[in-house]
Image (cartoon, helix red, strand yellow):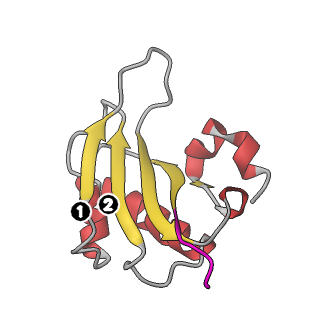
Amino acid sequence: MSEPYWLRGIRGATSVVADEPEAILDATRELLQEMLRRNGLDGFDHIAAIFFTTTPDLTSTFPAEAARELGMNMVPLLCNQEIPVPGRMPRVVRVMMQVNTRMRQDEVQHVYLGEAAGLRPDLISAQ
């Protein structure tokens, strides 16, 4: 009997230089590609869904468009806006990628790029 697959969440976040569509899409593409690479995902079949959030200061495009540009045409994608917490880091795209995998929870590699690396220094040190 083979080992079962588990639904795991892979977290990621990146900072964006400006509220411009190309800046948001470039940063999101880079983040998604790095999340796939670090977690050994060479295709999209094991991705159950991806949830994107943006801080309230990013409104010029949907970050999910970057996933579509990468070929994730059959992956369910959803964009939301973060709650406007005072003092939060500005211009951040966050990702919750749900994947079916045999990785244990402690084997999942969460990815934080740019200024967003400061959001979870506890995870960055393990990468």
Mark 2: few/some/many CA within 10 Å (<14, 14-19, 20+):
many
Give the quarter of the figure containing the N terminus.
bottom right
Q: Which mark is residue 65?
A: 1
Q: Are marks 2 and 1 in contact (CB under 8 Å)?
A: yes
Give the quarter of the figure containing the C terminus.
bottom right
Q: Give left or right: position of 85 versus 69.
A: right
Residue 78 pos. (x, y %): 25, 51
Q: Main structural element of the magenta stretch: helix, strand or loop? A: loop
Tell me if residue 104 comes above or below residue 87 in the rendering.
Answer: below
As helix, strand or loop, the secondary structure at mark 2 comes to helix
Going by the picture, which residue comes out furthest to the front? 1
Disc 2 and disc 1: Cα gap in Å? Answer: 7 Å
Q: Mark 1 is on which residue type?
A: Glu
Q: Which residues are magenta?
A: 1-6
Q: Does the rendering let one see residue 110?
A: yes
Residue 113 pos. (x, y %): 57, 54
Corner quadrant of residue 77: bottom left
| 42 in the magenta segment | no
Q: Give left or right: position of 49 versus 27.
A: left
Residue 64 pos. (x, y %): 27, 58
As helix, strand or loop, the secondary structure at mark 1 comes to helix
Going by the picture, which residue comes out furthest to the top? 86
Q: Nearer the viewer, residue 109 or 112?
A: 109
Q: Nearer the viewer, residue 94 or 5?
A: 5
Q: Give left or right: position of 73 versus 5.
A: left
Mark 2 vs 1, N-terminal side: 2
Residue 32 pos. (x, y %): 45, 65
Residue of label 2: 25
Q: Nearer the viewer, residue 107 or 68?
A: 107
Mark 1: few/some/many CA within 10 Å (<14, 14-19, 20+):
some
Q: Mark 2 is on which residue type?
A: Leu
Q: Residue at x 54, y 69 (%)?
A: 34
